Amino acid sequence: MLKENQVKLTEEIIETAYKLLTHKLAFGGLKARNESAFQLEFGYILKTLGQLYEFRLADKFHLEFETYIFLNSRSIKSKTDRARVDILLKYQDNNHTTKAAIELKFFKKANHREPNNRYDVFKDISNLELYKEHDIDLCYFILATDHSHYYNQSQYSADTCDFDFRHNQFYTAGKALQYKTLKPYGPDISLKQDYSFAWDKINDLFFLKIKI
């Protein structure tokens, strides 16, 4: 299999798993309404699909939870030369290996942790950009929430309004995002790519998927 085809199939597995997970959650087929359950259910769907994509004896699909990616520079997330990623996928044959890193968030309205949650989203995206420079072919950030605050809040406070990924908002590469409170939650964040935030609203849940 050509490397390009392997990457394309891995992306297809992730996109299909995302669609299945979001619809099963929103329509009641799954009851995972917290981050750990969200991760486990997504991992199960990914593994099931991945095994179906083992078309030849040489094709192997492997999935790991909470595993480490080794870096040659420090990430915001870990502050060390290795970073723990929520889900790491490997789809390989005798000639090539495609790796995909996925970071997940599930924000519950009942556990309203604002505005730190919004900062953490951009922190994850920044780390995923770094992973792509370290032998990771595909990187995704996926967020689920039952709180419209992240989807279509009318406005955020001036101190934290930089951290904005509401539906149809944009981020321009290189823009510094600042936490302007007296005691900032974290250092400034600047991303390397442009981003357009397009959410999926399904029944009472909101989903954001970003391919890095």
Image (tube, grey):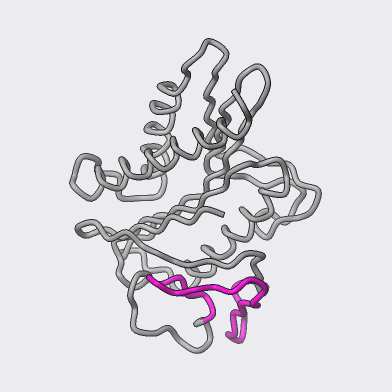
Instruction: Kindly give the residue lying farthest to the top in the view shown.
Output: 57
Report the magenta stretch's main SS.
Answer: loop
Does residue 69 appear to the left or right of 111 in the view shown? right
Q: Residue at x 58, y 67 (%)?
A: 194
Q: As rendered, which of 22 and 38 lies closer to the eye?
A: 22
Q: Residue at x 30, y 47 (%)?
A: 22
Locate the C terminus by quadrant. Answer: bottom right
Locate the N terminus by quadrant. Answer: top right
The magenta stretch is: 162-187
Instruction: Kindly give the residue lying farthest to the bottom in the view shown.
Output: 158
Q: Position of residue 169 (x, y in %)?
A: 44, 74
Q: Position of residue 132 (x, y in %)?
A: 67, 48
Q: Position of residue 76 (x, y in %)?
A: 68, 60
Does residue 129 appear to the left or right of 62 in the view shown? right
Where on the picture, by quarter, is residue 130?
A: bottom right
Q: Position of residue 150 (x, y in %)?
A: 38, 70
Q: Residue at x 44, y 73 (%)?
A: 114
Does residue 198 appear to the left or right of 136 in the view shown? left
